[in-house]
Amino acid sequence: MKKLLLPVALITAFLVRAQYDVTVTTESYTDITGGTSLNNGDVWDDPGFTIPIGFDFSYQGFTLSEIAINEFGLGGWLSTDQQGTGTKPLLIAYGADIIDRGYDDTLDDGGDNSLSTISYVTEGAAGNRILKIEWNNAGFFSELVDDNISTDFVNLQVWFYEVNGAFQIRFGPNSVTNPTQSYDGLGGPNIELIPLYNLDAEIPIGTGIALTGDPVNPTVVTSNDIELNFISGTVPNGTVYTFTPDNLNVDEQLPIATALSLYPNPAKEYFNIRTPNQGQIKEIDILSLSGQRIETLNTLNKEKIDVSGLAQGAYFIILKTENNQIITKKLIKQ
C-alpha cells in the first residue's frame, strides 16, 4: 500500500454537521456512452484529472464549476482540483488503490497498453443536467505489482445532479478474488465525505461521513472523531449509494454561498462579510490552513471582524448561517 488511506481520526468538533442523507438502492449498471476520455489511452496510477461539470454544483460549502480526480488519492478521490497539496474538501468515492490493468511496473512510464479507461459525460437539459464520471475495468495496485498480474477488477461511476445537489456512487461488474491483497488488508474500500483535508499533513478537518460494514446495508457513521472505516468486502454489481443534501434548501441557500464575500481581502485590521442578508450569518470560525482553530466569533450585529491580532498569511473562514448551512472562504491577512 502506497499511502495511508486516512489518518486515525477526524479532528475538531466545531466545524460541520452532516449535510447528506444516505440511501442504498439496486439499479442496472450501464456504461456511459459518448463520453470524453481522461486518460486518452495512457496507462494511469494515482491519476490527476480535472473535469468540467457543465453547471454549478455545491459540495461542502464550495460552489464548483469543475471537479478533479486528486493525484494525492488512490484513483478514486475527488476534490476541487487535482493537485496533491493544500487543504480542500474531499469526496472519497472509492478508497482502494486502483490502477490501470495495463500498467507495467517494470517500465518507467508504466507502459502504453491501457486496459482501463476513465471518462466523463454531462447529459440532460439546463436545470436537469447530470455529470457522470466512470472508472471502467480498473485493477488493484497491490495485486498487479506484487504478482505482475491483474485478475481483480472493479467498475464504478459517480453521478452529480444539477437539480437537487445530490450525487451517487454507482457500482458495476466486478471480481475481487483476493480481497486481502487487493484491499491491502483493510477489508474493503472506504467511502467518505470530508469537509476539508490537509493533504500535506494528512489531517482531515471537521465532521465527516463514512460508510462501513455490510455493503448492501452499510452503517452511516457521522462524527468528528471517525476512525478508519471501510466497507466489509466488495460492493455488489448494481449497488447505488445516493447522498442527498438533508438541510439544504437549494432555492434559498445556494445564492447565499454564491453571493457571499469577504472584504477587504486581503485584510489588514478587519474584514466585513457581504451577504444578501447580514443576519443570516450567526457565527464564524477562523482556521489555519493546517486546520487549527484560531478563534470562534458570534457575528450577529457585527459590521467588522477584527483580525488585527492574526499573523500575516492565509486562513480559512468558516461561516455558519442561522439555518446551519456551512460556507467556507479563504482570507489573506496582510
Image (cartoon, rainbow, N blue to C red):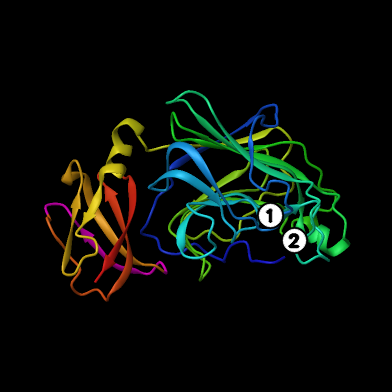
Residue 72: quadrant of the picture? bottom right
| Image quadrant in which the C terminus is located | bottom left
Q: Are marks 2 and 1 in contact (CB under 8 Å)?
A: yes
Q: For mark 1, give the secondary structure.
A: loop
Task: Tell me if 58 is positioned left or right of 295 in this view.
Answer: right
Circle 2: is it few (<14), some (14-19), or many (20+) Cα within 10 Å?
Answer: some
Q: Nearer the viewer, residue 130 or 168?
A: 130
Q: Is residue 323 visible?
A: no
Q: Which mark identifies residue 135?
A: none
Task: Tell me if 114 is positioned left or right of 325 in this view.
Answer: right
Instruction: Point out residue 56 in the picture as x, y percentages from the top left corner.
Output: 41, 38
Q: Is residue 292 magenta?
A: yes
Q: Is residue 7 above or below residue 157?
A: below
Q: For mark 2, give the secondary structure.
A: loop
Instruction: Point out residue 96 in the picture as x, y percentages from the top left corner.
Output: 68, 54
Highlighted magenta segment, given as a residue range: 290-301
Residue carrying label 2: 184
Residue 323: quadrant of the picture? top left
Dot placed on the residue nearer the N-terminal end, 2 or 1:
1
Q: At label 2, which amino acid type do we have? A: Asp
Q: Is residue 311 above or below residue 66?
A: below
Please tell me which residue is depicted at 75% across the width and 52% down the height of the picture. Answer: 100
Circle 1: is it few (<14), some (14-19), or many (20+) Cα within 10 Å?
Answer: many
Please tell me which residue is depicted at 71% across the width and 52% down the height of the picture. Answer: 188
Q: Is residue 154 magenta?
A: no
Q: Nearer the viewer, residue 39 or 288?
A: 39
Residue carrying label 1: 96
Task: Tell me if 197 is positioned left or right of 248 in this view.
Answer: right
Residue ranking furthest to the top: 125
| Image quadrant in which the N terminus is located | bottom right
Please tell me which residue is depicted at 37% across the width and 57% down the height of the picture. Answer: 15
Q: At label 1, which amino acid type do we have? A: Ala
